[in-house]
């Protein structure tokens, strides 16, 4: 797996307010990047932008040295995204949910769903309807995709929310494994994360200065 | 670990997921039909039971109620997907969004429009619809409900991020429904009057063909607009 | 070619429009007033009395042009929306946003004058006539777009959503027009049919035509003023708008800013 | 820190919050009304424009459409409160739950039933409702929509935890709506026919009185059942 | 403030499966109790039960030495609960949301809403509609009640979710302050919490033994 992701001078706005500005960063194969910042700094906005769900106000996002808006189809094939919300349907069983989430990226996988269920410790709940799960268990259903996806870029918005200690350790191990194989992980988390070679990008440092604020409005 | 698991092809899986979801919500399959049933049943109670009067208003009422029944649960089509983040997953899927949309609409129609259509002749009987109208009712409702679903899905996509989406959708969609309603009910009326309804049927089928081509990309665009803010 | 392209893109610039339109207003305003005054005074005061309807027919000078321009307004709105969607420009969206309420008002005016007219002539305020139905639906289409635009949480998204809806509506408008007309002839043989043409003599036709042109001017005028207002609201944070508000006397556009 | 801030009295604040929420969703105030308007407008298109026919079905149709309009957005009454955890807050509030419920229903009626009622005579005009029917329509819809809202709120409370609640609710509630519909439309019909409608009005008012007493605790109970699983 | 809360031998079930069993615990004035356990252990269920939102399968919950089901009105007046979900309406502004949350417990408060907004660092957003807030900011809107409530028992289900580091520290300080004044706090959290005198209740220890399982089902 050879991957490279870079932000070139991007800035993002919300309701005409600049959140951050002139953000440039380069992630090579094997990068594990944690985006940090206070509540409302724009972490989620940045993650959405780099997935192509939003357009940046200025600047470009390059994947394999190519702007992501040029060949979105190719980019999507190498992307796995998980946001604040948990895309899990209460009325389907755990297995069914995992199946359809996986079907959105129809690529062969080396792990079976059974195996993924074991990894996230939900084997006993395989046929339980998801609205009967606890908060953390629902989250685990979505996280099981990390064991099934073939994507090389993982973008995770607070993946550790609601997950217990053992689960967090397991998850951290999986992220480490992915980067060791050459993948890239971009995540946000307010919890202290124990991961090796973790790079950190502090959004607070890219806030527009006061003059820029005034110039812009 | 060694074995390689083929994932089901994506869009087909959405359809099967949607069918499964719909099956899980079994009430939803039954419900537009029941709404239709109750709506039509209440009619004689409200306007009186004169057979002649009922027969006169039957074509129009059967169509109006079919339209309202189709509309009723449509606003939830993308709502849950939006709220639980599935919509973002759809957008980031390697499948083209309009295909996913098309399958969702198809699943909805199979579970609402189709049973409703099959139901209609029986309800026509209750309203003493003259015998000539049954085929017209069945044949026009078939493409008609499909158009209504496609157009309604656009409304649902445009209002998915709005809290009070359901009724906003009604407002923006109703004017778009009118031609279908007019053509459909006049087809049944003219069949009852002994004239043919070929022209109306041809119009509805043409309309469906256009909607099938135009709507999925429009809906996909609307979904992108709704989520990308 | 290149020049045309540049011009086209400048069209997308709100600032360019704001500067230019203040010049247009200088001649558009008097022209509109003159046309409107001529048409209405001629029509309402000097055109001959209709043999059948007496003076009540004079409502036509308000009613018919409003109807014609209301429909045209829908297409202006939809085309502006399409341009905005395709070329991702700000200005067309502002034009679209401004056209909707104007069109809705004209539609409502048609409906109101029509039903006021209906009372003496048809003996009822409301008749399920093909054109009445069409007008009513047009009103709904306008209201839908206004509503959608007003409740969208984000303005950009709201603009795009409205544009999409207006575009789909464009396909629908002729269909409604046809189906209503066609359906009407099928269901109800014209019991009360008002054939406009027969009652219009040249002496009424000319003021009517002037009124139509005047209404088009009114529409354009309102559209420009509304768009200018929209520009000021939306661009309030930019430097050039701030400069404008600091020198209110220098630019006569400042007066319209308070519209 | 030193000053002591009086909190607004609870239930009143719920009402004011609900009114404010409703005002924020302005579209919701307008919408049942617009749904009503559109529903009635479509009627002549579907069943024909003969004045005589329209006048005959007008009382029934005005009532049926009012009912459907009231019903339409009712299912969202507690849905968002359930999903964002506000319902648990209501249950744990020091205010009695039935009072909170009553205020919610009141806010809903003020923004839906009332404007709908005021709208009705104008729509009656469009359907060429005979002149005698207007007062009957106005006076019966007033308590009628209030009963419909109270009863519908019970349905909303019972189905709040079901994903596909909207239509389940329709099913549960429709039979309960029947008496109101029958009484209301027959009041208008008999007013049109030149008889009085005192008896029907009295019945509706009595029904409202009972609903006002019975429903809030029943709704509160239903909410407790729905959330406590 | 003098408060006491005790569980007497309670057990909870979900779908006829016993989650925990024979749980007894006593919280005196000033207790800060963290309920811990793996995902699905039953923490949320326990918290709902002790608020009176669910009935325990067996056992009693005593507040001020009285069963809470005997005088629910009194109990509710001294309770503040915040669950997994955030009871915040997107269409109301921050201030409006705070006002109505407060109005559910109409008791005088010594803090103004302004003050509470400052405490949760949302003063700049006072008139922003809540659907324009970030995940953490929404959560803060709900948490602002901690500065307004007069309740002596606080029951908080993962209050630190989505909150940034500074926010967590501030919150911890507030909890400490409350217990120092004699209040009781019961909370769950999977994040390590830095609080003094924190007691911990591990639900895993109250799981039914295998025999009980067999006996029951
Ligand atoms: C609410 C009621 C009415 C509505 C919505 C309405 C609508 C319209 C519309 C849309 C047009 C433009 C038609 C076109 O250009 O194709 C129009 C034109 C006209 N209307 Fe009305 N109308 C109403 C009532 C009336 C009444 C009561 C009269 C007179 C008895 C009347 C007389 C005319 C005439 C003479 C024209 C111009 C005729 C023509 O050039 O086709 N309208 N009306
Ligand atoms: N839908 C929206 N419309 C307008 N503004 C928004 C919207 N969502 C977020 N914002 C604003 O954008 C800013 C950044 O939000 P974002 O969600 O990116 O923050 P975040 O860094 O992810 O915060 P958190 O740690 O709380 O998740 C916030 O100040 C917020 O007020
Ligand atoms: N609505 C429900 N219906 C049936 N069973 C449920 C329901 N909600 C939760 N459960 C089950 O009850 C058990 C306890 O759930 P609970 O939500 O109390 O766990 P929790 O300790 O809060 O977990 P988490 O750390 O994930 O929040 C879980 O095993 C779950 O599967
Ligand atoms: Mg975030
Ligand atoms: Mg929990």
Image (tube, coloured by chain):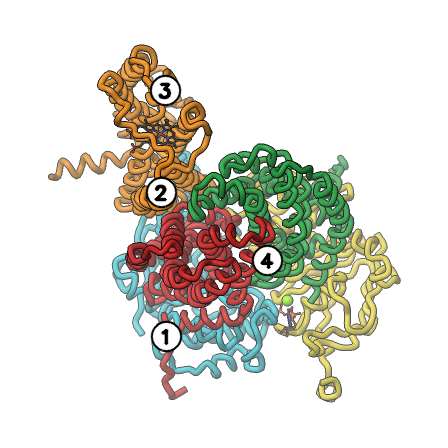
Chain colours: A cyan, B red, C orange, D green, E yellow
Mark 1 vs ligand 4: CB under 8 Å? no
Q: How many residues crowd mark 2 within 10 Å: few (<14), some (14–19), many (20+)?
A: many
Residue in the picture at 68% in, 59% down: E156
Rendered location of residue B207, percent (x, y): 31, 55
Q: Is residue C240 visible?
A: no
Residue in the picture at 74% in, 47% down: D207
Q: How far apart are the two marked residues, 2 and 3, measured between alpha carbons?
A: 25 Å
Residue depth check, mark 1 versus mark 3: number of the one nearer the observer: 3
Q: Dot 3 corresponds to which residue?
A: C53
Residue C9 higher or lower than B176, as above or below: above
Q: How far apart are the two marked residues, 4 and 3, measured between alpha carbons?
A: 52 Å
* Whether labels 1 and 2 share one chain: no
Q: How far apart are the two marked residues, 1 and 2, measured between alpha carbons?
A: 60 Å
Q: Chain of mark 2?
A: C
Q: Which mark is residue C184?
A: 2
Q: How many residues crowd mark 3 within 10 Å: few (<14), some (14–19), many (20+)?
A: few
Q: Is residue D13 visible?
A: yes
Q: Are marks 4 and 3 in contact (CB under 8 Å)?
A: no
State which image quarter holds ligand 5: bottom right
Mark 2 vs ligand 1: CB under 8 Å? no
Q: Chain of mark 3?
A: C
Rendered location of residue A179, percent (x, y): 39, 72
Q: How far apart are the two marked residues, 1 and 4, measured between alpha carbons?
A: 45 Å
Mark 3 vs ligand 1: CB under 8 Å? yes
Q: Is residue A46 left or right of residue A130?
A: left
Q: Secondary structure at mark 4?
A: helix
């Amino acid at each position: 797996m050879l991957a490279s992701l870079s932000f070139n001078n991007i800035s993002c706005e919300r309701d005409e307010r600049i959140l951050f500005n002139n953000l440039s960063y380069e992630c090579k194969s094997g990068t594990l990047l944690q985006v940090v910042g206070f509540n409302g700094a724009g972490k989620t906005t940045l993650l959405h932008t780099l997935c192509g769900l939003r357009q940046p106000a200025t600047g470009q996002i390059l994947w394999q040295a190519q702007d992501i808006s040029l060949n979105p189809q190719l980019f999507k094939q190498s992307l796995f995204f998980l946001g604040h919300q948990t895309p899990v349907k209460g009325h389907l069983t755990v297995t069914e949910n995992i199946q359809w989430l996986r079907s959105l990226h129809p690529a062969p996988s080396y792990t079976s769903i059974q195996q993924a269920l074991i990894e996230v410790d939900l084997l006993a709940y395989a046929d339980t309807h998801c609205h009967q799960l606890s908060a953390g268990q629902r989250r685990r259903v979505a996280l099981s995709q990390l064991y099934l996806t073939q994507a090389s870029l993982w973008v995770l918005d607070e993946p550790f929310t609601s997950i217990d200690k053992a689960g967090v350790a397991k998850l951290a191990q999986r992220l480490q494994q992915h980067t060791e194989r050459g993948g890239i992980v971009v995540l946000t988390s307010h919890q202290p994360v124990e991961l090796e070679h973790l790079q950190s990008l502090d959004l607070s440092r890219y806030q527009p200065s006061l003059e820029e604020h005034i110039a812009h409005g | 670990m060694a074995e390689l698991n083929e994932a089901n092809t994506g869009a087909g899986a959405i359809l099967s997921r949607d069918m499964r979801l719909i099956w899980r919500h079994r009430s939803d399959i039954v419900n537009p039909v029941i709404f239709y049933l109750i709506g039509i049943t209440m009619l004689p109670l409200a306007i009186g039971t004169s057979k002649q009067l009922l027969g006169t208003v039957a074509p129009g009422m059967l169509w109006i109620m079919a339209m309202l029944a189709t509309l009723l649960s449509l606003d939830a089509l993308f709502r849950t997907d939006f709220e639980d983040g599935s919509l973002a997953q759809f957008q980031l899927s390697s499948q083209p969004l309009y295909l996913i949309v098309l399958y969702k609409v198809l699943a909805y129609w199979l579970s609402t429009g189709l049973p409703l259509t099959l139901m209609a002749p029986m309800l026509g009987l209750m309203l003493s619809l003259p015998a000539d109208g049954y085929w017209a009712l069945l044949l026009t409702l078939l493409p008609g409900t499909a158009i209504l679903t496609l157009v309604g899905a656009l409304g649902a996509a445009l209002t998915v991020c709005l809290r009070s989406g359901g009724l906003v959708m009604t407002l923006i969609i109703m004017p778009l429904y009118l031609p279908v309603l007019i053509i459909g009910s006049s087809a049944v009326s003219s069949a009852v009057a002994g004239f043919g309804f070929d022209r109306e049927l041809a119009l509805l089928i043409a309309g469906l063909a256009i909607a099938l081509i135009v709507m999925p990309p429009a809906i996909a665009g609307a979904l992108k607009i709704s989520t990308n803010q | 070619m290149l020049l045309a392209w540049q011009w086209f893109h400048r069209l997308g610039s709100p600032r360019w429009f704001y500067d230019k339109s203040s010049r247009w207003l200088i001649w558009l305003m008097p022209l509109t007033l003159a046309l409107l005054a001529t048409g209405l005074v001629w029509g309402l005061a000097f055109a001959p009395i209709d043999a059948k309807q007496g003076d009540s027919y004079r409502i036509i000078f308000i009613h018919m042009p409003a109807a014609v321009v209301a429909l045209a307004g829908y297409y202006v709105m939809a085309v502006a929306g399409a341009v905005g969607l395709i070329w991702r420009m700000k200005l067309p969206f502002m034009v679209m946003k401004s056209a909707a309420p104007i069109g809705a008002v004209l539609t409502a005016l048609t409906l109101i004058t029509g039903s006021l007219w209906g009372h003496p002539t048809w003996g009822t305020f409301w008749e399920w006539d093909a054109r009445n139905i069409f007008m009513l639906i047009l009103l709904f289409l306008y209201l839908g777009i206004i509503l959608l635009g007003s409740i969208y949480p984000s303005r950009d998204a709201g603009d795009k959503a409205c544009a999409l809806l207006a575009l789909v509506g464009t396909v629908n408008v002729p269909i409604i027009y046809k189906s209503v007309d066609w359906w009407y002839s099928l269901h109800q043989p014209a019991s009360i049919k008002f054939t406009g043409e027969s009652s219009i003599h040249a002496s009424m036709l000319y003021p009517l035509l002037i009124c139509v042109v005047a209404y088009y001017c009114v529409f354009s005028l309102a559209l420009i003023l509304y768009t200018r207002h929209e520009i000021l609201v939306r661009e309030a944070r930019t430097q050039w708008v701030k400069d404008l508000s600091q020198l209110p006397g220098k630019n006569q556009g400042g007066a319209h800013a308070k519209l």
